[in-house]
Structure formats: C-alpha cells, structure tokens
Image (cartoon, rainbow, N blue to C red):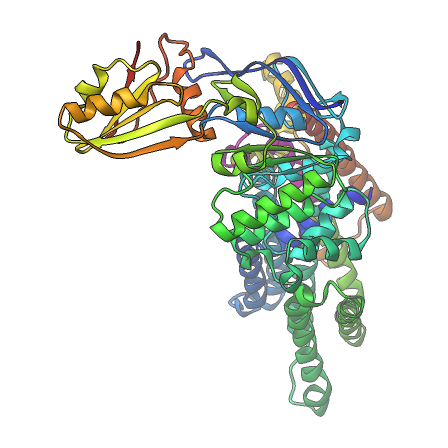
Amino acid sequence: MSLAIETHHLTKTYKSRGGKPVNVVDDLDLAVETGEIYGFLGPNGAGKTTTIKILLGIIHATSGDARVLGEPAGNVHAHKNLSYVPERPYYYEHMTGFEVMQFYASLFKIKDDDLCRRLLDRVDLTNDMHRPISEYSKGMQQRVGLAQSLINDPQLMFLDEPTAGLDPLAHKDVRELILQFKSEGRTVFISSHELSEVERVCDRVAIIHRGKVIEQGHLSELLAGARTEITAKGITADLVKGLNVPDGVVSTVGDTVLLDMPESGDFNAVIDAIRQAGGSIISVIPRRMRLEDLFVKSVREAPDPAGGPTDDKQGDEEVTEVTA
Amino acid sequence: MSIILSIAKTTVGEAIRRRILLVILLVGILFLVIAPSLNMLTARQEQTVLISLTLGVIQLTSAVIALVLTVYMLPNEVERRTIYTILSKPVQRWQFLVGKYLGAIGALGLMIAMMTFTLLFVYAVMQSEVQPTLNLVVIEIPIYVLFIANLVALVALSNRLKDSAKGQAVLAALAAGLVGILYWIGSQSGMLDQFAVFGKTTSMFFVQMCLLAAVGVFFSTFVPPTVNFFLSGGVYMIGSLFNSLFDAVAANTDMPFAAQIAVKVVQSIIPNFQNFSVQNAAINQGTMIRGELFHYINLTGYGFAYISILLIVGILIFDRREV
C-alpha cells in the first residue's frame, strides 16, 4: 500500500529561553498508509501541531525528511490534494458560511457555487449558510471547517483536534463525517486528545511524547490484552500489594481498593485472600484495555530525558506499581 | 492572479469593518466637516489655512489608518490561525503577502476617497455665497442634502448589497451619483479646476500611503505590531520631515565626513515621503507645477519602485519565517 505521509528522522529544534536547544519533534518516523484513519496522539506540548505544521510546510524541519502524497512537505502541488482543519478554526467573521466556502474555493481557482452549497448541505448548514460566521456556534464553525476542507475533494485530510470543545451531538456528527471520509477512500490524519473518539474511528495510532514516538501500530494490536478490575472494601491497600500480583496496579479511592490485573492472572486467589482478610468484594469486572489506558501507561513509562519515568500523577488518587 | 485578488478582496472586506479604523476615519471626516466653523481668521487667511488644515487632516488620518491597518495584518492572521488554512491550500507565501497588501491599499483607497468627497463637498459649501434666494432653497440645499443622503446610503448599504449583481449595480449608481453631484456643484460654482487640484493632491496622498503601507507590511514580516507601529511611524516621520535637514547636513562641509556619509545612507534608504506632499497647488490657488503630468508620473514611479523593493524583501523574509 502506498504511503500518504512519510517522515524519516524528522526533527524540529527550538531554542529555549535560556538558549538551550529543545527538540520539539525528535527523530520522528511516521508512515501513514493511503486510505486509513491515523490517530496522532500525545499530551499537550508533545509536538503534534508542530509536526502537522511541518507536514503542511508552514514551518520547516531542522533536519530529517518529510513527504506528503509523495512530494516534499510544503510542496504547493501536493496542497492541491490535501486539506487542513485547524484546532478551533477561525474564519473572517464578516463572511457568511457560504462566502467562506466561496473564498476557499477561489484559492483552488474553483468557481462553483453549487459545490459550495452541496458541501454546506453535507454538514447540515443549508439553513444557516447566509448567516455571518460570527453568529455560528463552535460546532457550526467546526462543520464549516470540515466543509471547506472538502472543497478540493482531497486525498489527504489533516484534522487538528476536530472535536475539541464540541457538545456530544456535534461530536457524533463529526465522528460520522470522519468515517464517511474514510469510506470515500480519503486518508485522514487526526491529532487529538479525545481518546475515546480516536478509538472509535482510527485504524492506527501513534502516541508521541516530547517529540518522540513512544507507541505506534494498529489499535487492535495495541489494545490487545484484556484485564480484570477487582474492587474491594474493608481492607488496606498494603494487603493487596503484599499479594505481589504480576503486572497489577493497586489504586485507593477513599476506603475502596481497586486492583487492576491481567486477565491471565489468578484473580480467584486474590479474591480468596481479600475475603480471608475480612474484606468484601464489591465487583469483579473483566475489561478490555482502552486507548486511554494505553496512552496514560505509555506516557508515564516514557523515559524522561532528565532520568526516570515521567510522573504525570494527578488528583488525589494514589497509584502504585506492584511488581512480582 | 485570481488567488491574490481573492485574498485582497477578503482583506478589504475585513478592513472596512474594523471598528478602530472606522473610528479613525469618522474622526477625520468629522474634523473636515467642522473645520469651516473655525472662522476666526480673516477671509484670505481663512481659506488658505482651512485648505491646508483639511488636507493635513486627510494626510494624518490616512497615515494613522495605513499604520493601524498594516501593522496588525500578519500578526492577526497568525494569532487567529486563518493563515494556516490559507497556506495549506495551493497558495504561495508571496501570493498571500501581495494579496494582503493589495487589500490594505484597496481599503485605504476607499477611505481616502471618502475623505476627498467630504473635502470637496465642504469646500463647495464653504465657497457658495449663502443668500436667501429661490435658487438656494429650490436647487442648492436639496442637492447638498441629496449628496449627504447618497454618501450615507453608499456606506450603509455597501455590506448588504455587495454580493448580488443587482446590489453591485445599485452601489455603482450611488457612487456615480456622488461624482455627478460633485461635478454639478463644481461646474455651477466654477470650482471644477480647484476640485481637480484637490483630486490630484489626495491622489498623491494615496501613493504616499501605499508606500507607508508597504513599509508597515515589510516590518510586519519580522517585528511585533507595537514595534512595527513605532518603526513604520518613525520612518514616515523621518521621510516626511527631515529631508531638508539631511540636505543641509550633507551640504555642510564643516560636518565630519563620516556624518555626511551616514546622513546620505539614511537619506537613500528611507523613502522621501515629503515628495508626495503636493498640496501647495491646492492651498495657494494659481500655483502651477511645471511639467505637472511628468512630475506626478515620476512621483508614482518613485513610490512604486520603493513599494516593489519593500515587498520583495518582505516576501524573502516571510518565505523563511515560521508562522
């Protein structure tokens, strides 16, 4: 299968305020296949938007190579066949939705008002197309963004946080549109924090942290390996830790102890031990690994340039690794 | 070319809706309207000072508009991320920059034209001898009212009518009506020649402001807006006020050679904005400019050459800049 996006050792270096060079994108290798939906994930400041800007030619890489639709990144010929919807898109507020479409069509030298109407109709903005953009809700602006991104019938679409700040209904609309794009044979490159959305639509994902890919592959492979979650009361976390469950994670929320362990583990022995210690089992839930779990695990375990894993613990939940 | 024009058209649409620019324009127009009431001067002085004052108001207002319009142009595009959706289309950076520049001078041209219309109208009213005749009541006052109504309608309806062919025809008719009324007033009062002098003067202001806008666009490719405002404003001030001083320093043999060279370099780099201030012919009626047409063509060519250099260097910088 041909590649829509390809990067080799892509690096972007900025100087920090102290003058120290910082690799915002660090030796990044990506290979996005034609026709797939590719999720590009990472915490804030991981280098996602910088990578997209390099791929679009808005900024230049410090070193390495990036090709988009077979052309060097930033090549104007490649731009004829791609589109980009930025995070929280802004359009000239004096324009109506229809004028926005006309404007972006004119940048492709397309003069086709019917096409503009059809695309606005596709994102359900027929009744609002002659209202100024300034009166549109966030969801409507996002839909205009998606409509304008289709004006050139692109082979490749870059969507930067396409569902950020949208209500659940708008989420669903955008998700359905993205799946339609794939069914039309387009390649969709999504950068997002909305992991549940990514999990629903993407074929493959890459998780980046501090500019480096820390996990990459098909979702089905990455999320393989089901786990079991045991919730108990009336015992201490130390008791469960003392059980030394391989690859188990113990969390405490108030007086409730949660044990997250591999499905293959001996959970009957754990339940017996808890009961013998006078504790009561609240629930035993078998669960498939979610993208969020993978994301959190990957980011936390990613090596810190300063040494040791990243510590991203938040809130009042205490998390302890239990090792065999 | 169609890409550049699309960007330019959008820039004009955005500029003429920016409140800050409209407030500056309104203040300028208001000053033009109330200027004749400053009649504490004698009749001869009144006219000379008044024309000088009103032309000065147009020039100053245009300069402030040109600066405000251009210094925020690129930073706003980056801050609002509109530049990303545009540059991700098959649009080259030079097309974007030239389109933005043409849009800026298009908006400037419209605003200078409005101030010029107001100036001509105020001048015509000021020159007419108000006597309670039938002619005044039946013809002149209704014509003046019609002019004001026409101008207000043009401004108020431009946004609503600009998109349809019929609307554009109405706007063109309103604009033609304004010119027609001014022509009628000018021909009735024998002021057409003076109107033409005003027209030429403000046309040169327009070229001057196009040059100032190019300076603003040039600096906006690498400095933040506030710094740009002072840099471009400073270049305009130096180019408008200090050329005589520079000439004097350069001609003064007592000055150190290095100072003379430095002055020459600064004088060569900074455009001479003073060249475009041709209001003497308008202020002192009867003043003739020798080889007038050639002079104006020469001035326009000078401005165009500087604008081209500034835009080319600006494009080279912008092409390498990370936005």
Q: Residue at x 64, y 28 (%)?
A: A58
Where is residue B69? Give x, y as percent: 60, 46
User: How many labels sit on residues?
Assistant: 0
Main secondary structure along the magenta-highlighted residues: helix
In the image, residue A170 sits, relative to residue A281, either above or below, namely below
- Report the span colored magenta: B207-229
Let me know if residue B251 appears in the view.
no
Residue at 61% of width from left, 50% of height from top? A143
| Residue found farthest to the top | A307
Q: Indicate left or right for B223 with B286 as reference.
A: left
Q: Nearer the viewer, residue B200 or A66?
A: A66
Image quadrant where residue B190 sits: bottom right
Query: Is there any visible trace of residue A137 in the rendered image?
Result: yes
Does B218 lie within the magenta span?
Answer: yes
Q: Is residue B270 magenta?
A: no
Relative to A103, residue B246 above or below: above
